Image (cartoon, rainbow, N blue to C red):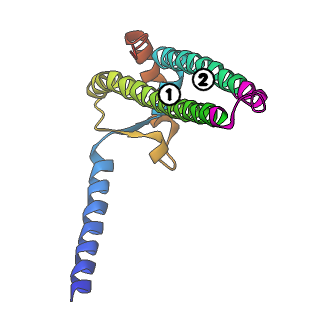
């Protein structure tokens, strides 16, 4: 009995969506946009990418310096193995292990920070893009804007990416990530 009820609901939903899309295509203007292209190629997007790369490079330099210091300390401890007592050697090894653990935690923390910064940048870019899309949609009587990656095939004249990129570059030159 439940199976039949589910089947009836599913058929009803399919009929509803088909009729909705036929109405939509007959009366409404639908376009699509490549948000990834705009994020990566706009002035603000390129600026955000540079900010993220700068942060990544500074983190990488700091981590490389720490890693080299740990390697130097490890070599120093190894060379002292036969000179110092076993107890003292064990203490130094434990200290080194703790420092390595802290280094690994810091590395994960910096990686997470970079991922958050990248997500934040994309979010800020899209938030800055929304008013431009709204204005463009009102001006050109567009009912719906879809993401290009959600579309399998579409007329190229329905792609508004370049027009929006020009508008976006005129209005948003850069975003502040910090």
Q: Secondary structure at mark 2?
A: helix
User: Main structural element of the magenta stretch: helix, strand or loop?
Assistant: helix
Q: Is 87 colored magenta in this rendering? A: yes
Number of the label disc, if any, that sits on residue 63: 2
The relative height of residue 19 versus residue 51 in the rendered view (above or below) is: below
Could you tell me which residue is drawn at 47 percent across and 31 percent down? 109
Q: Picture quarter containing residue 121?
A: top left
Quarter of the figure with the N terminus: bottom left
Number of the label disc, if any, that sits on residue 110: 1
Q: Position of residue 90 (x, y in %)?
A: 63, 37
The relative height of residue 13 versus residue 120 in the rendered view (above or below) is: below
From the viewer's side, name the closer residue of 150 and 22: 150
Number of the label disc, if any, that sits on residue 78: none
Q: Which residues are magenta?
A: 74-88
Badge 1: residue crowd in 10 Å (few <14, some 14–19, many ≥20): some
Could you tell me which residue is drawn at 58 percent across and 36 percent down? 94
The relative height of residue 69 versus residue 90 in the rendered view (above or below) is: above
**Which residue is farthest front?**
85
Is there a contact, CB below 8 Å, between mark 2 and mark 1?
yes
């Amino acid at each position: 009995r439940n199976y039949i009820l589910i089947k009836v609901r599913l058929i009803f939903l399919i009929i509803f969506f088909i009729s909705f899309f036929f109405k939509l295509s007959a009366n409404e203007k639908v376009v699509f946009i490549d948000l990834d292209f705009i994020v990566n190629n706009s002035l603000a997007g390129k600026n955000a990418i540079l900010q993220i790369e700068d942060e990544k490079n500074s983190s990488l330099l700091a981590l490389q310096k720490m890693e080299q210091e740990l390697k130097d300390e490890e070599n120093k401890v190894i060379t002292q193995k036969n000179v110092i007592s076993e107890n003292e050697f064990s203490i130094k090894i434990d200290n080194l292990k703790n420092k390595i653990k802290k280094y690994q935690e810091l590395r994960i923390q910096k990686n997470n920070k970079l991922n958050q910064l990248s997500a934040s940048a994309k979010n800020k870019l899209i938030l800055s893009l929304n008013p431009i899309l709204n204005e463009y949609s009102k001006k050109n009587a567009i009912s719906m804007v879809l993401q290009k990656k959600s579309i399998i095939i579409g007329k190229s004249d329905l792609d508004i990416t370049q027009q929006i990129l020009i508008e976006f570059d005129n209005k948003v030159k850069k975003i502040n990530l910090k």
